[in-house]
Image (tube, rainbow, N blue to C red):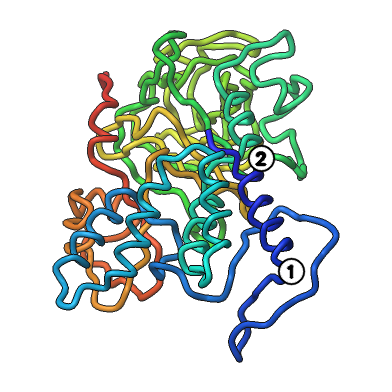
Amino acid sequence: MLDRQAIITRSVLRCLIFGVLYVANSAGFSAIAQSSEVVPALVVYGESKLVEDEEALTDERLSVLLDSLCTLDPAPHSLIRDLRLFQRMRSMGSDQMVLLIDSLFELDTVPYALVNEINLYVDQLPTQAEVDQSRLLAWTHGPDGPAAELYGTWDVSGPNCYGTLPFTGDSTVQLKLIDASLSCGYHVPVPPIVTSRFGYREGRNHNGIDLDLEVWDSVRSTFPGIVRFAAAFGGFGRLVVVRHYNGLETFYAHLHRFKVEVGQEVEAGDVIGLGGSSGHSSGSHLHFEARYKGIPIDPARLIDLTTGNLLCDTLVIKRQRSGYAAYPKGTRFHTVVKGEHLVAIAANYGVPVPAVCYLNGLPERARLRVGQRLMILPTASVEQFVHVVD
């Protein structure tokens, strides 16, 4: 794993050795004073990059871009040269990358656009701290309950018992959802007949999804874990909360009957209750939530609600100002440019239009806006995760 901190710090130090750090302003480049301290930051030398994308280039898009540039007449040889160097750099180890950055600063004309592209790429790699945090979010079960290192004491007083906590050190984490070696599987809670999605609804946020069912239908645990709460609670009605060993919690609300009790260990697919319409409910259905440290995330980012299949074996979660952004590991990001439409974007990535629409919550006839960012999940990433819906 590349050490992002070491590479960026080395890049900053190299710049200080040369005596000047350049930043962009409206008139071009200006020098700023040297600092006695090195701070972790994305180093940018002016506004130019090899490619004007917000995200670092994927390997696939980089190859396509190089192929297209080589067909131009005349071909932009200097750009092609820099892109090929950037392409080779992506397979380097951290020591080799530091040497490459050093060599670029020793040139008579420093290729700042190439340095910026390298720094953007390095900045988007997982840091060692993030890798370590990801390891913590594998399946763990200590004496204080599942994922005790994340939550502290095992609190069974209510479903929302965390309050507003800072949760520092987890700006980006990876949750391992399934692990065949540990028999940690997955099962859809009920057949996926969606009647309401996650998001803003009727003047307030709907923190989960509603799945249609009949009274007495079996409701099953999505992943292995331990029941943390099982009681009637306000608008939830009869509610079961299961803490899973990776730190995720799932909520199963409006139940008619409980089939588990607090502290009981469950496996994926175990019946935890029977469907009903208790609490604030206008008809029988299951209100299903997925939460990380008490904050709701969209279940559609880990479960394909059209099939009930799991979208990925690892879920990436990024801390944001108002909550968490979650998406399957392997998701690529596309920034819409003028003239693009869904059909062309889907074809460019080799995925069906419905797959793009599903992950981004868009109708198939949606009008895109310039600068809009779309999530693209390769079809191959989805097809390997299957299960049987009872």
Give the residue at x 62% y 62%: 43
Q: Earlier in the sequence, mark 2 or mark 1?
A: 1
- Report the front residue among 225 and 353: 353
What number is the disc on residue 65? none
Q: Residue 307, percent across and down?
A: 25, 34
Q: How many discs mark residues in the rendered view?
A: 2
Q: Residue 257, percent across and down?
A: 50, 18
What number is the disc on residue 19? 1
- Report the front residue among 291 and 46: 46
Q: CA distance from mark 2 to mark 1?
A: 35 Å
For disc 2, the marked residue is 170
Give the residue at x 64% y 13%: 262
Q: Residue 3, percent across and down?
A: 60, 39
Residue 77 found in image quarter: bottom left
- Report the front residue among 384 and 199: 384
Q: Secondary structure at mark 1?
A: loop
Q: Nearest to the eye among marks 2 and 1: give it.
A: 1
Asked if 248 appears above or below 283 in the picture, the reply is: above
Amino acid carrying label 2: it is: Asp
Circle 2: is it few (<14), some (14-19), or many (20+) Cα within 10 Å?
some
| Quadrant placement of the C terminus | top left
